[in-house]
Image (cartoon, rainbow, N blue to C red):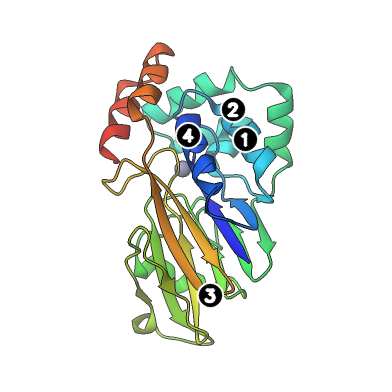
Amino acid sequence: MRVAVLSDMHGNATALEAVLLELDSQLVDHIVCLGDMVGYGARPGLCVRLVREYSDAVIRGNHDRAVLRPEEAGSFNDAAAAALEWTRARLTDDEYAYLSSLPASRHHPGMLLCHGAPSDPGRYISGLRQAATEFARFTETVCLFGHTHVPACIHAPRGEHAFADCDATHPSPGRPVGLRRDLRYLLNPGSVGQPRDLDSRAAFMVVDTGTSSATLRRVPYDVGAEQARMAAEGLPARLIQRLAVGV
Ligand code: ZN
């Protein structure tokens, strides 16, 4: 089974459409989405509709939740809060209903899907120290997570283990990382719509349970076209500029 893992498209339908086009040649059996379809980009409604149409399993992210519950946007920075406010006025009732129907986490055969961390959808796993305590919070072989917008492949031995037993493999685009039977994994596909690893290309991951591997994919898309859409909508300049750099 080949599973395409998409996360954090953030209203950037230009990037999401490029990824979906690329998936035509990837021969995947399932597409799963780890949330944050909205917030930041110029076409949040289209992102919601595309994810809904093409994904087999979807969970909500913190932005998807905050767009439904404004009182939870308190921790957002000014640009994120402004983009969320703009987004809130543009989603249809149908898109709201879909977002509010999504769970915070869910199971897919052999995998757990979560947005930030198994222990908390809003927690950032940005290194081994945060990851180490999370392995005890799920029972599946693989936990898929997003939220940081940085691809990651972190592993730990099955069963009880010390912090020193956790390690990470840097995922390089197009190069499969073998998934060992004696290990469990926390895998992050990076972000479709707002990468933050100094690579502006859209990111996603393919997990192949047949060959026991995970492969990061990068897809170039028309960043300038998305920036022009955002500028035309009056979205914050900082959010527009960062797309070109991947921060
Ligand atoms: Zn996000």
Image depth: mark 3 or mark 2 in front: 3
Residue under label 1 = 50
Please state which of residues 173 and 26 is positioned toward the viewer in this rendering: 26
Label 3 sits on a secondary structure element that is: loop
Q: Relative to residue 195, is residue 50 drawn left or right?
A: right
Q: Amino acid at mark 4?
A: Gly
Q: Residues within 10 Å of mark 3 (few under 14, many from 20)?
A: few
Residue under label 3 = 211
Q: Give whichever of discs 1 and 4 has the lower sequence position.
A: 1
Q: Is residue 11 above or below residue 61?
A: above
Is residue 69 among what the camera can see? no
Q: Are marks 1 and 2 in contact (CB under 8 Å)?
A: yes
Ligand 1 closer than 8 Å to label 1 CB: no
Residue under label 4 = 74
Q: Residues within 10 Å of mark 4 (few under 14, many from 20)?
A: few
Q: Is residue 203 above or below residue 241?
A: below
